[in-house]
Image (cartoon, grey):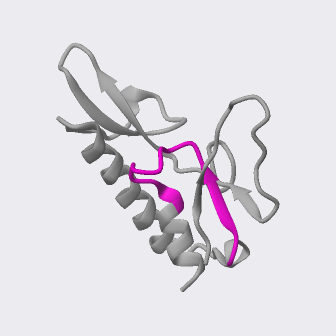
């Protein structure tokens, strides 16, 4: 069974042999990011690589809600375009998201292994 691995930047950490990196800016990275607006004191979800003034944003009071929304948008993107995730089947996926946080790698594991 494939699992999500918390990728780290610490010295000496190595990605396991059967794992694939799914972080940005790679092929499997989630284009939806979570940002924080200090003036308003809220979190927002926006599309990476698109200027903030030219994109749709949605605001949240809690960072975890914003992250869950970014993951939902990623799932919608994959299903809308019927992305073939078969190359990830059976592989462990590495991402920088903390293990307890919502992560797009969970969506990739689910879609690749169904």
Instruction: Give the magenta range.
Output: 90-105
The quarter of the displayed image where residue 55 is located: top left
Above or below, 78 against 48 in this view is below
Image-based side of 51 in relation to 3, left or right: left
Q: Tell me, yes or no, whether the highlighted magenta stretch contains residue 93.
A: yes
Above or below, 86 against 46 in this view is below
User: Nearest the camera: 62 or 43?
Assistant: 62
x and y, in percent, of residue 108 in the image: 55, 67
x and y, in percent, of residue 94 in the image: 64, 53
User: Nearest the camera: 81 or 102?
Assistant: 102
| Residue sitting at the far top | 39
Q: Tell me, yes or no, whether the highlighted magenta stretch contains residue 107.
A: no
x and y, in percent, of residue 114 in the image: 54, 86
Residue drawn at x 40%, y 50% is 100
Residue drawn at x 37%, y 27% is 53
x and y, in percent, of residue 5 in the image: 60, 55
Image-based side of 19 in relation to 80, left or right: right
The quarter of the displayed image where residue 2 is located: bottom right
Image-based side of 103 in relation to 114, left or right: left
Residue drawn at x 45%, y 54% is 103
What secondary structure do most residues of the magenta stretch adopt? loop
């Amino acid at each position: 069974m494939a699992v999500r691995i918390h990728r780290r930047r610490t010295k000496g950490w190595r990605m396991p042999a059967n794992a694939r990196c799914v972080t940005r800016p790679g092929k499997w990275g989630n284009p939806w990011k979570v940002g924080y607006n200090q003036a308003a004191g809220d979190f927002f979800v926006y599309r990476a690589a698109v200027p903030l003034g030219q994109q749709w944003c949605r605001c949240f009071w809690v960072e975890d809600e914003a992250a869950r929304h970014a993951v939902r948008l990623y799932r919608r993107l994959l299903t809308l375009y019927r992305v073939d995730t078969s190359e990830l089947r059976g592989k462990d996926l590495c991402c920088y998201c903390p293990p307890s946080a919502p992560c797009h790698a969970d969506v990739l594991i689910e879609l690749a292994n169904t």
